[in-house]
Image (cartoon, rainbow, N blue to C red):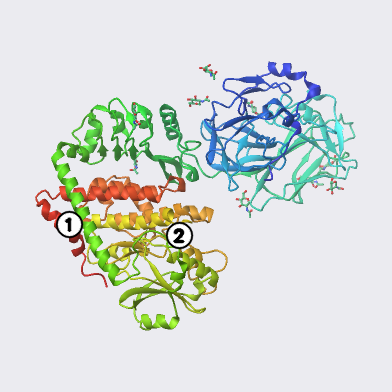
Amino acid sequence: MVMLRTLKHFLALLVATGGFALLAHAQNQRGFLSIDCSLPRNSSYYEKTTGLFYISDAGFTDSGESIFLLPENRGTYQQQMWSLRSFPEGIRNCYRINVTSGAKYLIRTTFLYGNYDGKNTLPKFDVHLGSNLWDTVSITDASEAIVMQIIHVPSQNYLHVCLVKTEDSSTPFITSIELRPLNNTAYQTQMGSLALVNRYDTGTPKVETGYRYPFDAYDRSWSSYNPSNWTSLSSSLTNDINVRNSYQPPPIVMSTAATRKKKRDSLDFWLPNGNSSELYYIFMHFAELQKLKDNQIREFNISYDDVENWSGPHSPRYLSLTTVFSSRGLKGGRRISIYATHNSTLPPIINAYEVYMVKEFLTSEADQNDVDAITTLKSTYGVKRNWQGDPCTREYLWQGVSCLYDDSEVPRIISLNLSSSGLTGEISPSISNLKMLQTLDLSNNNLTGSLPDFLSLLPNLTVLNLQNNHLRGSVPPGLLEKWKNKMLLLSVCGNQDVNAPVSCHNKEMQKKNVVIIVVVASVLGIIVVLSTVTAIWWGLKRKRQHHMPSTSTIKTDSRKSRDLQLTYSYILKITNNFERVIGKGGFGTVYHGHLGDTQVAVKMLSPSAVRGHRQFHAEVNLLMRVHHRNLTKLVGYCNDGTNTGLIYEYMANGNLQAHLSDDCPYILKWEVRLRIALHAAQGLEYLHDGCKPPIVHRDVKSTNILLNENLHAKLSDFGLSKTFSTDSTTGSHVSTSVVAGTPGYLDPVYYVSNRLNEKSDIYSFGVVLLEIITGRPAIDESHNRKIHICDWITAILGNGDIRSIVDPRLQGNFDISSAWKAVELAMNCVSPTSIQRPTMSQVVIELKDCLDKGLAWNMESRDNINWKDSIGTRPSDSITQLSPPPR
Ligand SMILES: *[C@@H]1O[C@H](CO)[C@@H](O)[C@H](O)[C@H]1NC(C)=O
Ligand SMILES: *[C@@H]1O[C@H](CO)[C@@H](O)[C@H](O)[C@H]1NC(C)=O
Ligand SMILES: *[C@@H]1O[C@H](CO)[C@@H](O)[C@H](O)[C@H]1NC(C)=O
Ligand SMILES: *[C@@H]1O[C@H](CO)[C@@H](O)[C@H](O)[C@H]1NC(C)=O
Ligand SMILES: *[C@@H]1O[C@H](CO)[C@@H](O)[C@H](O)[C@H]1NC(C)=O
Ligand SMILES: *[C@@H]1O[C@H](CO)[C@@H](O)[C@H](O)[C@H]1NC(C)=O
Ligand SMILES: *[C@@H]1O[C@H](CO)[C@@H](O)[C@H](O)[C@H]1NC(C)=O
Ligand SMILES: *[C@@H]1O[C@H](CO)[C@@H](O)[C@H](O)[C@H]1NC(C)=O
Ligand SMILES: *[C@@H]1O[C@H](CO)[C@@H](O)[C@H](O)[C@H]1NC(C)=O
């Protein structure tokens, strides 16, 4: 916060000096860009007191609302301060400004709240430059302008200034943006950009307004600074100051200097006391203002942090500029002292100085060609979404865009999903400039024209989905060639006029209308059979154990659940003194037990996992009222002060992870996998959407998906990590922060936000889905290094062969389109930002679709099998393959 300055004065109307407006018009504002935010499109004006030319911000942003301050709230500010643009919608809104890459700019943003919304709320928000945080704007006084200035060299020929909501989610706004090209040889640093801390005109007594343009050729703002024990020295020869170095401080600023009365007194000031990692640069400007007599010498040295002779000796010449600056970053809180040398007969002077803080912007922005291409697409198709600023900034990725990050290179766009975006017109040639594109989805739009061959020039394109558009003509040779060589997964179905020799499921099905009906009938048949079987099974089950869940409503009868509190001795009895361990988890050990003739799983919580008994009761009572066929049911609990246990329904086939592992003696079929995923998804959907308040699982993983004797999957351990903490390694009480989640499954957003929500569950579910698809563990540690499944799949997706993704043990026995869909769904779930992830109900719908595809394929691919047979045998087929169960 150290660089934020409220410089009301230099932005004020210089009433007394209205005269130089005309003068300014005549001068050359070379390369100046002055944007008055919310000025109507195409309008512009010369500001009265400075003569600066302000233009509308309409061409630089496509969001926000324009607002004019009430006249009584405009104070004595210059005209550009009278209006602002506010951004109530979206998290991040950006300005895109064309610049010259490699040129050095002074960038100044101002913020005058002026209680524009009548709420008097004092907003707080972040300002980003490109993908990096510049600073936080925190309004403390509605009538005081905040000014942020930075000297920055853009690496691309555009610059993004973004306003970002912070946690207190107040509405960001901006009043003006000004860009001033500087001389590249001035303000050199070893690294980073320079955020202004202060820029002082010393020795100028009683100046109310500071100086800016037209006094300063670069429109820097100078404010006066005069500690009480300094005195001033001035020259009337203002225009004779020889300002020939690249800094060009204004002659009027240089024509006054601070000095001391006594020769031996020094001019001291301190660098800001920032935190220890912050570094500062200082630039000091000197010019002798007295015509010295022959016996007079003014000579001084400069010390930094009491290191004498840090710089010197200096003896500025009459009316001639000397600039002294640090050649590397200086630590804060240290003293700079300007003191006379022994030979000097006069006290030291200083005419002006500037202090800047180093801002290292480490996150690079996306490749410029990619950005140009996608920006063109954005305007060609009028894409709305959150397409603002840099497309690859991790926290604010553009919806439908994914990028490849390589520390040594700029991020590249590798996937673009514009499905169902209402696109019209032809396929834009700009797409061919997204050179690293691997996946392109333009399905379900109104695109017309022919299939362009330029898409074949994308070297890495492996998935091209153009389904359901109005494209015509034939598939161009380049694409056809790639498709034939199995380098491209091409989908053009749903374009009636495309003359495609390309295989496409729908197309094939269209040809065989009869077959479709048969298939649909068969699928329905299976579903009927399945549901009958399930119904019968449920019926039997219910007779045997009356605690089985039957409905998906939360029962509110809490008295009933209290009945299921068991004593410790009873627990000992039903588990036969903890005879058989069936699992071990973060919260404790799980034992096998019998409640009457019903098998149960008894989870004994380690003492350190229970935090407070009142909370335990509240939570358990809530969990016992959650009923859903895809959630393991909590049937009772034990809590006598020392021993705490939870009693769950028993799931005969253990957890999903064991079934996916290499040690498992059999292989789960593709459709079975999808069904398990669907079950788990439905359980999670219920927690998110069916429960009030919604329950965040917080620890979705393959070991928490349990399978019963029919491979019906249920989610377990939901809601636990909120109340209970996992065993800490020290064995002591885990107090404040609740450890949540499991490495490999934990939402990366958590490391930033420290909060888990529904979208974190979606991420974890995505990881589980990837495990199900690939048969690989979430973190593969087999080759002496840890490879996360998401990284693995991102790498392997590049070669576009679904067979290298899906579990090789399936030996290709799966439907390709179903597999692609599942992979795509999983990848959406593990999107780096929560906003890009689907909701659980979307996941359920997609999974149903995958399962339908899988089942349809299964039958299609068995043309030689009698349909009746396959209906009869298919469901049990998948089950018989599994016996004996793993125990
Ligand atoms: C702005 O100017 C452009 C070109 O000069 C013109 O096409 C456009 O209609 C103008 N817009 C408005 C809102 O006046
Ligand atoms: C910025 O530059 C791009 C080309 O690089 C151009 O298409 C665009 O119109 C320019 N924008 C403005 C506001 O000048
Ligand atoms: C000069 O005044 C400043 C405050 O205005 C004070 O911090 C500093 O110690 C004084 N210096 C001397 C040498 O008195
Ligand atoms: C930048 O400053 C240097 C040194 O004073 C000068 O030679 C050069 O002409 C300046 N460049 C511009 C573009 O003004
Ligand atoms: C110090 O400042 C740097 C950069 O502004 C920041 O990243 C860091 O978190 C700060 N450290 C502390 C201890 O505040
Ligand atoms: C000033 O600096 C010069 C050169 O570094 C040194 O020789 C001289 O002793 C210094 N004078 C004082 C008073 O520190
Ligand atoms: C001081 O002045 C004397 C005589 O003019 C000269 O010899 C000496 O080098 C000077 N000392 C410094 C540190 O400049
Ligand atoms: C395509 O355009 C028609 C009208 O021209 C519209 O009804 C339809 O919704 C559009 N389809 C898509 C996918 O945008
Ligand atoms: C993409 O294509 C480039 C150039 O043909 C190639 O060097 C690169 O390895 C490819 N990247 C991937 C991930 O396939």
Q: Would residue 410 be found to the left or right of residue 802 on screen?
A: right
Disc 2 crowd, CA 10 A, few/some/many (<14, 14-19, 20+): many
Residue 274 screen position, x and y as percent: 69, 50
In which image quadrant can residue 60 be found? top right
Residue 847 screen position, x and y as percent: 31, 50
Q: Would residue 695 be found to the left or right of residue 517 on screen?
A: right
In the image, 739 versus 156, the foreground residue is: 739
Q: What label sits on residue 874 in the rendered view?
A: 1
Residue 202 screen position, x and y as percent: 80, 36
The CB of the residue at mark 1 lies under 8 Å from ligand 8: no
* Quadrant observed for ligand 8 in the rendered image: top left
SS under mark 1: helix
SS under mark 2: loop
In the image, 564 versus 158, the foreground residue is: 564
Look at the picture and state if 38 lies above or below 413. Answer: above
Look at the picture and state if 745 lies above or below 819. Answer: below
Instruction: Quickly name the residue at label 2.
Output: 698
In which image quadrant can residue 654 be found? bottom left
In the image, 206 versus 218, the foreground residue is: 206
Residue lying at 54% horizontally and 45% vertically, measured from the top left = 362
Q: What label sits on residue 770 in the rendered view?
A: none
Q: Amino acid at mark 2?
A: Arg
Real-space CA distance between mark 2 and mark 1, rounded to the nearest whole angstrom = 35 Å
Q: Closer to the observer: label 2 or label 1?
A: 1
Instruction: First in sequence, mark 2 or 1: give its number.
Output: 2
Residue 181 appears in the rendering: no
